Image (tube, rainbow, N blue to C red):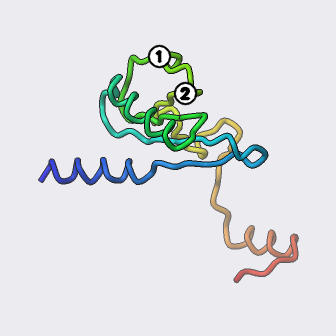
C-alpha cells in the first residue's frame, strides 16, 4: 500500500510540470519541474534537460522535494535554477508585518459596520 501512495505522489508532482512562453518574447520558453524524489541526481537532470531542449526551452526551474548536490552551471546551454520546496512555502500569517488579529465583540462589530456604512450579508 505504501508503494501505491508513493507512486500517487510522484504522479502528482509529474502532473505539475509546466511550460510557459515569455509574453514579450515567444522565443523564450521556460519549463518548471516539480521533483518528488529525495535525491535528484545527474541522470535525472540530463533526462529533464533533454526534454526541455527538445521542446524549445531556454530556461528550466527545478523545485525539489529532496536534495541535490548538482551545480546548475554544469548545463551551459540552458539557464537552470534549483529551489527547495520548503524554501518556497510561506505562512503569510506569521509574517512580521501581519498584525495580531483579535475577535471583536458584537457591539464593536455593529459600530464598525455603522462607521464604514456597510451591511452584513
13 horizontally vs 33: left or right: left
**What is the x, y in percent for residue 70?**
42, 18
Quarter of the picture containing the C terminus is bottom right
Q: Which mark is residue 26?
A: none
Work out how far the residue at label 1 is from the one at label 2, CA to CA, in angstroms.
9 Å
Q: Residue at x 66, y 35 (%)?
A: 96
**Residue 78, relative to residue 115: is it above or below?**
above
Between 54 and 45, the one lying in front of the other is: 54
33 horizontally vs 14: left or right: right
Secondary element at tag 2: strand
Secondary element at tag 1: loop
Quarter of the picture containing the N terminus is bottom left
Count of numbered labels shown in the rendering: 2
* Label 1 Cα neighbours within 10 Å, binned few <14 / some 14-19 / many ≥20: few
Q: Which residue is the site of mark 1?
A: 71
**What is the x, y in percent for residue 39?**
31, 27
Mark 1 or 2 closer to N-term?
1
4 horizontally vs 13: left or right: left
**Residue 109, relative to residue 47: is it above or below?**
below
* Label 2 Cα neighbours within 10 Å, binned few <14 / some 14-19 / many ≥20: many
Q: Residue at x 39, y 17 (%)?
A: 69
Q: Which residue is the site of mark 2?
A: 80
**What is the x, y in percent for residue 115?**
87, 71
Between 16 and 89, the one lying in front of the other is: 16
**What is the x, y in percent for residue 100?**
65, 46
Q: Residue at x 65, y 48 (%)?
A: 21
Between 88 and 79, the one lying in front of the other is: 79
**Residue 46, relative to residue 35: is it above or below?**
above
Amino acid at each position: 500500500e505504501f508503494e501505491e501512495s508513493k507512486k500517487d505522489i510522484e504522479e502528482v508532482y509529474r502532473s505539475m510540470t509546466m511550460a510557459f512562453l515569455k509574453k514579450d518574447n515567444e522565443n523564450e520558453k521556460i519549463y518548471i519541474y516539480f521533483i518528488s524524489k529525495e535525491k535528484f541526481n545527474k541522470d535525472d537532470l540530463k533526462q529533464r534537460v533533454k526534454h526541455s531542449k527538445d521542446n524549445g526551452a531556454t530556461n528550466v526551474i527545478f523545485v525539489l522535494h529532496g536534495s541535490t548536490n548538482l551545480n546548475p552551471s554544469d548545463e551551459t546551454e540552458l539557464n537552470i535554477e534549483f529551489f527547495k520546496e520548503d524554501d518556497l512555502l510561506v505562512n503569510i500569517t506569521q509574517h512580521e508585518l501581519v498584525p495580531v488579529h483579535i475577535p471583536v465583540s458584537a457591539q464593536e462589530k455593529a459600530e464598525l459596520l455603522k462607521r464604514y456604512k456597510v451591511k452584513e450579508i
